[in-house]
Image (cartoon, helix red, strand yellow):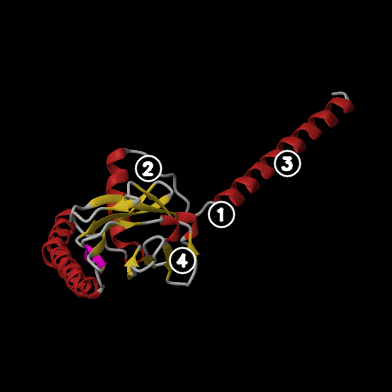
Amino acid sequence: MNSSIVLTLNLLALMFGAGLSSASWGFSLGREALKGITQPDTRPTNNVAIAKGSLNHREGLVLLEEEKIIVNIRNFILNGGIVEEKTTKKDSKKKQAQAKPSEATQPQQSFPIISSDSGVVLEVNDVRRWGNSLVLDVNLKNEGDQAVRFLYSFLNVIDDQGRILSASTEDLPGELPPNGRRYYGIITIPIALLDNAKELSLELTDYPDQKLDLKMSKIKIN
């Protein structure tokens, strides 16, 4: 045989032997590295069984059964929730009972507020808000024996902070006859003037004699 052919065959044999050795050595290393690792079982029945076993016992974790959970919730509702609800209702009733005396202690404005002098009577029947104005519903009557004249620019309105307020009147008579009849009208005050005011005072006199002194105070506006 030719020497070159023999050399070639020897080289092929050496290469084949080296490949087998490398493959065997690599397989051994891979097997050592994969020891303890198994392929997961993807079958549904086995997965459920494994999941139940692992969840119930892994790391000491214990799951309650569905019936026990329902019973616990029912007991909580019957024993805890209802008691809490009753307690809340009782507390709210107590708060309401405590609030009522405090509300009752607050002074309430009683109408009418009356001022009289020499048979002439001025009454304030109500205080209300109308648009941007505070409105006092008033009436005048004369139970004396002489007619009385009024000039309502002499009407003084003062708040509880001592401020003199601009006020206007409507429907009140310029001359009040001595017939005992009530004449109704209103006194209006711009709300913008009532900054932080809580009470008003009124003072009205006749014109031109200025003999009458019709006064009233502590008319609540809040």
The answer to the question of whether label 1 and label 3 lie on touching residues, with beta carbons closer than 8 A, is no
Tell me the SS state at disc 1.
helix
Q: Residues within 10 Å of mark 2 (few under 14, many from 20)?
A: few
Callout 2 secondary element: loop
Measuring 50% from the left and 54% from the top, which residue is drawn there? 35
Question: In the image, which disc is placed on residue 196?
Answer: 4
Question: Which numbered disc, 2 or 3, marks the residue that appears first in the sequence?
Answer: 3
Q: Quadrant of the C terminus?
A: bottom left
The residue sitting at 46% across, 66% down in the picture is: 196
Give the CA distance from mark 2 to mark 4: 81 Å
Kind of residue at disc 1:
Glu
Which mark is in front, 4 or 3? 4
Say if mark 2 contacts mark 3, CB within 8 Å: no
Q: CA distance from mark 4 to mark 3?
A: 106 Å
Q: Quadrant of the N terminus?
A: top right
State yes or no: residue 84 in magenta.
no
Give the spatial CA distance, label 1 vs label 2. 22 Å
Q: Nearer the N terminus, badge 1 or badge 2?
A: 1
The numbered mark, 4 or 3, whose residue comes first in the sequence reads 3
Residue at numbered disc 3: 18
Quarter location, residue 144 = bottom left
Residue 10 — which label?
none
Dot 2 amino acid type: Asp
